[in-house]
């Protein structure tokens, strides 16, 4: 059984989409191993987004992610990382496939409703940051 990290971002939490987003993962046979709600601080976010430090969009991204509650989850199933990425869709909701989480609930590249780990190695690193 593979595990991955999913974050439901402040835009989706503020728009009351948490239940609908979780339902998508459950309908796709994911087990929720851990879940918590928090407003992330600078330390968590700088660890999580360390590869983006120094990029033009970094300050806006951090400000957005600190702007409200985030739902952090560890989801598990066979091929969890790959399946979450398919379910989430393209990071730009305008380019995301119909029916994906980002197409349904995202509004921009930054405010795209969810984060999912890109690789198994990244999932392990990110799960240790958030849990």
Image (cartoon, helix red, strand yellow):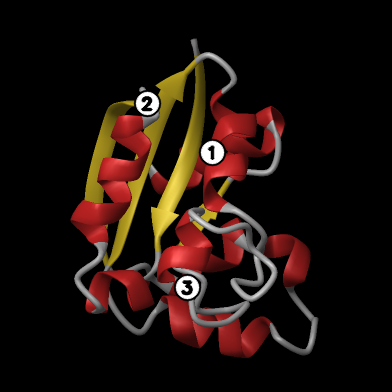
> Gap between marks 2 and 1, in whole Å?
9 Å
> Gap between marks 3 and 2, in whole Å?
21 Å
Reading the image, the residue beneath label 3 is: 106
- Name the secondary structure under disc 1: helix
Residue neighbourhood size for the residue with mark 1, other residues' Cα within 10 Å, grouped as few (<14), some (14–19), many (≥20): many
Indicate which disc residue 30 carries: 2
Which residue: 39% across, 71% down? 41
Q: Earlier in the sequence, mark 3 or mark 2?
A: 2
| Res 8 → quadrant | bottom left
Q: Is residue 38 left or right of residue 113?
A: left
- Name the secondary structure under disc 3: loop
**Foreground: 31 or 101?**
101
In the rendered image, the vertical position of residue 7 relative to residue 52, given as above or below:
above
Reading the image, the residue beneath label 1 is: 84
**C-beta proximity under 8 Å, tags 3 and 2:** no
**C-beta proximity under 8 Å, tags 2 and 1:** yes
Residue neighbourhood size for the residue with mark 3, other residues' Cα within 10 Å, grouped as few (<14), some (14–19), many (≥20): many
- Name the secondary structure under disc 2: loop
- Of the 4 image quadrants, the one containing the C terminus is top left
Does residue 124 appear anywhere in the picture?
Answer: no
């Amino acid at each position: 059984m593979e595990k991955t990290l999913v974050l439901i971002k402040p835009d989706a939490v503020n728009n009351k989409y948490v239940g609908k987003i979780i339902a998508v993962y459950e309908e796709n046979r994911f087990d929720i191993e851990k879940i918590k709600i928090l407003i992330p601080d600078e330390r968590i976010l700088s660890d999580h987004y360390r590869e983006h430090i120094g990029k033009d969009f970094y300050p806006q991204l951090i400000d957005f992610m600190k702007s409200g509650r985030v739902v952090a989850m560890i989801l598990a199933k066979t091929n969890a990382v790959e399946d979450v990425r398919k379910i989430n869709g393209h990071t730009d909701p305008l380019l995301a496939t119909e029916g994906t989480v980002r197409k349904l609930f995202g509004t921009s590249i930054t405010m795209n409703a969810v984060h999912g780990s890109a690789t198994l190695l990244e999932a392990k690193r990110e799960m240790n940051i958030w849990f």
